[in-house]
Image (spheres, rainbow, N blue to C red):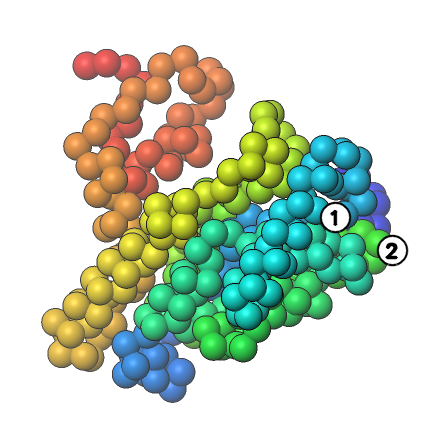
Amino acid sequence: FNNVNSPHFKKRAAMSNAVSTSAPDEPISKLSDAYLTLLKNRKLPLVLDLDHTLLNSVFVPELRQSLYALQNAMKLLDVDVARAEKSSNALQRNVFHLPHLELLTKLRPGVRRFLESASQLFELHVNTMGSPAYAVHMVNLLDPNREWIKGTIKGLGELEDGVLIAPTEKSLDGPLRELKDACLIFDDTASVWASHRKNLITCERYLFFPQARKQFGLPGMSLLDVGQDESEEEGMLATAMRLMKSVHEHYFKCYLESGNKTPPKIQDILQQHRERVLAGVRIVFSRVFPLDCDPKQHPLWILAEDFGAECSTKFD
């Protein structure tokens, strides 16, 4: 798949080039009507990833490879359906079998509460490496009445001979290009947002099914295997929502202090919040990096400095 001479690799490269060139990082000299409308309504754009951020999907044929995992998944599905039927509330459903896609999808605990809360402060958009059809299917599961997700829904991947071909990078393009200085991004994979890293809140991956752990080379039992799940009240989505509320409040406080004339940059607001995490902390990287590597260019060094730490390779 990663052979540079293969048609799949060339297709991915072409798609990535299209994404990266469709949204040049140029300053926006004048606020668009969409930007002004959001400011008037005290909202900001928020781009959401799907897989391993809001939900976890697994191909049923892969699930069948483990009888234990398949049995656990079917039990979970039966219990979920029964609970929703008893309450007569379709929004109680969290596990879905999609035969036409050969998928089993599990929503992250608290995801609908997260979407409801986020929609009061943000205009919600979706951007996934999955296909456009997959993106729409997942949004319909998350928000069947489209009460919360009212922005753009982008599926960047294309199915070709049963193989999903997707670009290696995502971008704020289309109507979001003019909103990039106000836009937050919530995704489990930082590398796909290389051009908009300063807009990104990276979340812990939601790996419910054992196949998801294997995908990222993680040993051990999955949440499905152990019969447990994330906490809805104290899990990743609840934690992220508290941060997003704080960033939103900070943003509009700065905007108000300017006399509602000059909106701040969300990148600057988010960076200020990051730097508080390790403020006053000094990290010494000893025998961590290769000798021929510039330590200041290493991702761990950059990450630590992003979060406010002072880095060194020796004790003073």
Please give the name of the residue rendered at 28% of the width and 27% of the height, measured from the top-left corner: 311
Kind of element beneath mark 1: strand
Determine whether, in the image, residue 177 is placed left or right of residue 6: left
Q: In the image, what residue type sits under mark 1? A: Phe
* Image quarter (top left, top right, bottom left or bottom right) of the C terminus: top left
Position of 100 relative to 304 (above/below):
below
Q: Is residue 243 visible?
A: yes
Quadrant containing the N terminus is top right
The answer to which of 21 and 242 lies nearer the viewer is 242
Location of mark 2 (residue): 161
Q: Quadrant of residue 253?
A: bottom left
Measuring from the top left, give residue 50's x and y in whole percent.
Answer: 56, 57
Q: Pick whichever, 7 or 214, lies toward us.
A: 214
Separation of marks 2 and 1 at Cα, in angstroms:
16 Å
Q: Residues within 10 Å of mark 2 (few under 14, many from 20)?
A: few
- Tell me the crowding category of disc 1: few under 14, some 14 to 19, or many 20 or more residues within 10 angstroms, Cα based: some
Residue at x 40% of width, y 83% of height: 34
Q: Position of residue 28 (x, y in %)?
A: 38, 74
Q: Position of residue 7 (x, y in %)?
A: 84, 50
Give the residue number, with chain letter if any, for mark 1: 59
